[in-house]
Image (cartoon, helix red, strand yellow):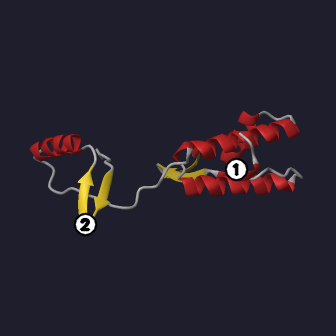
Amino acid sequence: MKYKFNTKLEKGKLDILGNAKFNEILIKLQASKDIVELEMTLGKKKKKRSNDQNAYYWLLLGILEKETGQEADDWHSTFRARLLKKHITVNGKQITLVQSTTNLSTLEFGEYIEHIKRIAAEYGIILPDPYSIDY
């Protein structure tokens, strides 16, 4: 079993957010006689896509619905299937998964939106930039 904790590094000191839960799990793991080593991975935390990005995305999908007659949810599914494929191997078989936009970082989500704008432009639909819209 793996556990995930958010941490903050400030002035060379690592602060584990949710420290009580962290200590509880350490005690539990220590009580298990079969555990010899633990693995810790550190890296910068990715910021998940913002609410503003998500609102802008659904506004764009609404524009596509208005322009084409195809529902916004269909566009959402289409873009996810086209742009957010992930290939994994299970028991020797190749499986294709479609990722959720929810797990994209702000940077990844921005790139996803830019791909959508380019695809729309191929069909003659120019989608507005976020700063040019009155919400």
Left/right of residue 90 with respect to residue 66 in the rendered view: left
Q: Determine the residue positioned at 16% across, 46% down.
A: 26
Left/right of residue 28 with respect to residue 79 in the rendered view: left
Q: Determine the residue positioned at 77% across, 37% down.
A: 62
Q: Residue furthest bottom?
A: 12
From this viewpoint, is residue 100 visible? no
Q: Residue furthest right?
A: 124
| First along the sequence among labels 2 and 1 | 2
Q: Position of residue 40 (x, y in %)?
A: 27, 58
**Kind of residue at badge 1:** Arg
Quadrant of the image occupied by residue 13: bottom left
**Vertical comparison of 102 with 121: above or below:** above
Q: Exactly how many numbered labels are in the figure? A: 2
The C terminus: image quadrant: top right
Q: Secondary structure at mark 2?
A: loop
Q: Secondary structure at mark 1?
A: helix
Q: Which residue is mark 2?
A: 12
Q: Position of residue 33 (x, y in %)?
A: 10, 46
Q: Determine the residue positioned at 59% across, 45% down.
A: 101
Q: Which numbered disc covers residue 82?
A: 1
**Kind of residue at badge 2:** Gly
Q: Position of residue 134 (x, y in %)?
A: 74, 42
78 vs 12, nearest the viewer: 12
Q: Sort mark 1 into few (<14), some (14-19) or many (20+) by Cα contacts within 10 Å.
A: few
Circles 2 and 1: CB atoms closer than 8 Å: no
